[in-house]
Amino acid sequence: MSANDDQQEQQRADSPTVDEERPPGAGEVAEHEIVKMEDVITINPDTTEVDLNHGRIGKIENLEPLTKLERLYLRWNLIKKIENLDHLTSLIELELYDNQITELENLDQLVNLEMLDVSFNRLHQIKNLSTLINLRKLFLCSNRISLIENLDHFTSLTMLELGDNKIRKIENLDNLTNMTHLYLGKNKITKIENLDKLVKLECLSLQCNRLTKIEKLDQLVNLTELYISENGIETIENLDQNKRLETLDLAKNRVKRIDNIEHLQELEELWMNDNGVSEWSCVDKLANNKRLATVYLERNPVANDVNYRRKLKLAVPWLQKIDATLCR
């Protein structure tokens, strides 16, 4: 991978769902502390970008003159309702991350929108987005959504982030045939299913769910990243067609043997810390993965061996990192 080690470590810690620190006062505040938008914005009709993050703004209003606006950033405010945006038909990006919004509404006129972020709000349902046919990235993580629904019209969508919700079933994604990145971590999903039509998918995140089996990934031949840590998986299997995998995250499962990955010749990162691997014979099979650069096996029984790092390096001499430490 082209990213440096620090970037990789950060990605491993936070990816695919990145939790950003919420500022003090992001919850309920006194009425007199809420800021009006007119007090913090300078109106310039030619403005194409407005950044009002961390503003304690309570209501979207007084933006009518900004007819050329393309990017509106309203992260970390106190907004409870999406409103007064109908005239901003040139908007390409709208960020409402970490507010107090309870419903997706009043977005019908934003037909040129390509990115919408309503993560960290109080949404219960995906709805009222049918006119946003040009949307390419939709971020809805950390809400209270229980169903994947009302997305059929998003044929241009390439990224969907639904991590940290209350979803139990992967469904209703068949029309999203251009999707390359799907994030469903930290939900209540029990089975990998209904992904066959997403043949362009490159990154799939299902970490921290209730999975017990790797299955039904045969059609995802373009997958390069698979994140399924923090589940109940016992066996590495059914990855025969996923030959382009570069990153495989199986940390914090119940895997006792490293099996069925010899064919993954593009594999660069294997994260298997906090499992039950106890036999060096299966670890030695990693010698078949000639591009493997990083392996995490800490907190497996094999890691208790006093010669753990030396044995792993002898098995895979081209390793660049073992656990969080660079090889020398």
Image: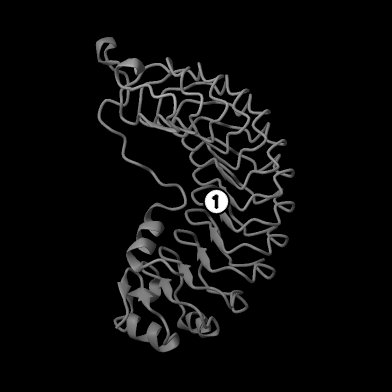
In the drawing, does residue 288 fall left or right of residue 7?
Answer: right
- Viewport quadrant of the C terminus: bottom left
Q: Nearer the viewer, residue 208 or 134?
A: 134
Local crowd size for mark 1, using a 10 Å CA cut-off: few (<14), some (14–19), many (≥20): many
Residue 35, given in percent of the width and then of the height, sits at 30, 17
Residue 312, given in percent of the width and then of the height, sits at 40, 82
From what the image shows, is residue 327 above or below residue 128? below
Q: Nearer the viewer, residue 328 or 272?
A: 328
Q: Which SS class for mark 1?
A: loop
In the drawing, does residue 259 fall left or right of residue 72?
Answer: right
Which residue type carries mark 1? Answer: Leu
Colour approach in the figure = one colour
Residue 111, given in percent of the width and then of the height, sits at 63, 30
- What residue is drawn where x is 59% and y is 55%? 212
- What residue is drawn where x is 67% and y is 35%? 133
Q: Which residue is mark 1?
A: 206
Q: Residue furthest front?
A: 46
Q: Nearer the viewer, residue 274 or 158?
A: 158
In the drawing, does residue 291 fall left or right of residue 77?
Answer: right
Residue 25, given in percent of the width and then of the height, sits at 27, 25
From what the image shows, is residue 192 above or below residue 304? above
- What residue is drawn where x is 51% and y is 30%? 144
Counting the numbered discs, the total is 1
Image quarter of residue 275: bottom left
